Amino acid sequence: MSRSPRFLARRLTRSFAVGVAMETTSKNWRKSTNPKLALRQPRADQPGEAENSAEADHPGGVAEDTRAIEVAKASWIEQEDADAGQRSSSDDIGGFDSGLRAQIESLAGNLGIDAVGFASAEPFLAARDALKNRQDSGLNGGMKFTYSDPVAATDPSASLPGARSLVVGAMAYRAPLASRPAEAGAVDSTSRGVGVSAAYSVSDAYSALESRLGEIASLLCSKGWQALVTVDKNRLVDKEAAVRAGIGWYGKNTLVLIPRKGSWFVLGSVITDAPLEPNNAYSGPACGRCSKCIEACPTGAIVAPGVLDASKCLAWLLEAPGDFPEEHREALGNRIYGCDDCQIACPPNGRQEHGGSDYSDRLGPDIDLAELLLSSDEELTIRFARWYYAKNQPRYLRRNALVALGNCGDPASERTVEALVASLSHPSPMVRSHAEWAARKLGISQKCLSTTSS
Ligand code: B12
Ligand code: SF4
Ligand code: SF4
């Protein structure tokens, strides 16, 4: 969960190049004859989302779907062009193409993908039931994402007809420094007026994984197979694919942990019709009797091992539309995007063997809250283009920042007061009411604020 459609639209330029390259190398360029792929439309996510952006995956969207279509289209064309003899042969034991699998493993290693696994593309029926049950019991807290179409999200062939295999990849991101309380969302004197974003949002591991999986998709296409890259989209339950591919296990915090490496990873897949031998699911040591993540969650959102109540999860509440729930405002601390507590508490994460790549486009994790609140909407839209927040409206960033400021601002700071004064006259009633809450929390009187504004 994390990226906005605007950011994805920028990335489309690069993504498109994959499709174009394939088109030009294809001897007989023809239009796709696969109506299902050609007619795929973006889905709307949270209500009202499409009004701003026409997007809406988690975080996918138009750009993402277009990319997927381009990759799939190119591969479809390749498939049309390839007669049976041109395809890589699947004459190994069990009909699997072990040569191609080995090539993919080697390419993944060369590309720096941190873990790779193979799974069958059979529907994920247990996850489908879980999605429906969560929805029925309200544990999805109004989220759409994979919940908007549980059948499609759990059936790879709904995205790529004829899908047989998944190549699942994991890409590490840099873990937060546990020595820095601000990064754990804890508020103390060192984090006064400073907001914090979760580790995964600081750099863009999603794009890194997506482009590397794109290389694997290109390899598959060059052998005459169809291939479609999906990273953090509504079209596939990524954790379930990773677990089936033997990459790791479901932790009690609901995240996938990789043996000896922990959970500071993002996940994605290439869906393909190539016959690749699947891995066995991981069967080594898992969480055992540990339950540190459940104890560490500031809102009690992990209601049973492996079960999250999203209506209590700070990571979702920061993305969700509407007011930030009063009962969870204090627990929010100085977070303004994402939450890492259930990962920071996790012992395997402390023992990780990797440092995580530090991709070039760092954003945060420390964010000056007054500066954010005094920025224009245009500035916020550009600066936080990669983040996913309700309806892509900067007023939701302001809402989050105001709750954080109420929790960690310095009432004696002129900048804090200035930011509150500006927010109290904001056109959005939601921003104004959160500014009032923050001022009350900091013990700054309305009188003081009105004196400052005059
Ligand atoms: C919706 C969503 C969210 C929601 C809800 C998360 C949730 N746990 O339900 C919100 C917005 C809260 C969220 C938050 C975060 N997310 Co998110 N999110 C997703 C998304 C889009 C869909 C998840 C989904 O559909 N899951 C399917 C449901 C059914 O899975 P489930 O609820 O976990 O149910 C399974 C378990 O219960 C398990 N199970 C069943 N019985 C039992 C019993 C036991 C004992 C156990 C242990 C498990 C278990 O089986 C069920 C499925 O069959 C995925 C991307 C994608 N397309 O998959 C990213 C994804 C899961 N998110 C990711 C990340 C990084 C995060 C955050 C860490 C970000 C942050 N720092 O703020 C937090 C972590 C919060 C948390 N503890 O989960 C990564 C996880 C990577 C990993 N290593 O696992 C994903 C995969 C994105 C990606 N492509 O990398 N996310
Ligand atoms: S992300 Fe934060 S609020 Fe959500 S389950 Fe983990 S610790 Fe709890
Ligand atoms: S904190 Fe313990 S129980 Fe929770 S995911 Fe990590 S190892 Fe599993």
Image: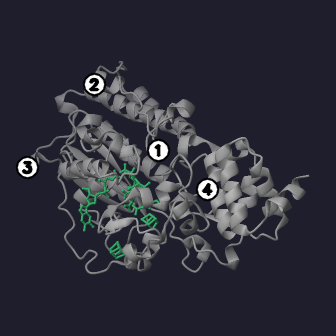
Secondary structure beneath label 4:
helix
**Element at label 2:** helix
Measured in 3D between alpha carbons, the distance from the residue under mark 1 to the one under mark 2, in whole angstroms, is: 33 Å
Residue 125, given in percent of the width and then of the height, sits at 18, 48
Q: Residue at x 67, y 59 (%)?
A: 437
Going from the N terminus, do you reach mark 3 or mark 1 first?
1
Mark 4 = which residue? 400
Q: Nearer the viewer, mark 1 or mark 4?
A: 4
Instruction: Find disc 1 in the rendering and name its residue.
Output: 59
Front position among marks 1 and 2: 1
Q: Is residue 227 left or right of residue 426?
A: left
Residues at badges 3 and 4 in contact (C-beta under 8 Å)? Answer: no
- Residue drawn at the location 48% of the way across and 38% of the way down: 15
The residue located at (60%, 57%) in the rendering is 360
Tell us which disc is closer to us: 4 or 2.
4
Q: Is residue 396 above or below residue 336?
A: above
- The alpha-carbon separation of the residues under discs 1 and 4 comes to 19 Å
Q: Is residue 309 left or right of residue 87?
A: right
Label placed on residue 94: 3
Closer mark to the observer between disc 3 and disc 1 = 1
Which residue position holds label 2?
81
**Dot 1 or dot 4, earlier in sequence:** 1
- 70 vs 445, nearest the viewer: 445
The CB of the residue at mark 3 lies under 8 Å from ligand 1: no
User: How far is mark 3 from mark 4, CA to CA?
Assistant: 54 Å
Amino acid type at circle 3 is: Gly
Query: Which circle's residue, 3 or 2, is located before the other in the chain?
Result: 2
Residue 180 x, y percent position in the rendering: 60, 77
Picture coordinates of residue 301, whole percent (x, y) = 40, 65
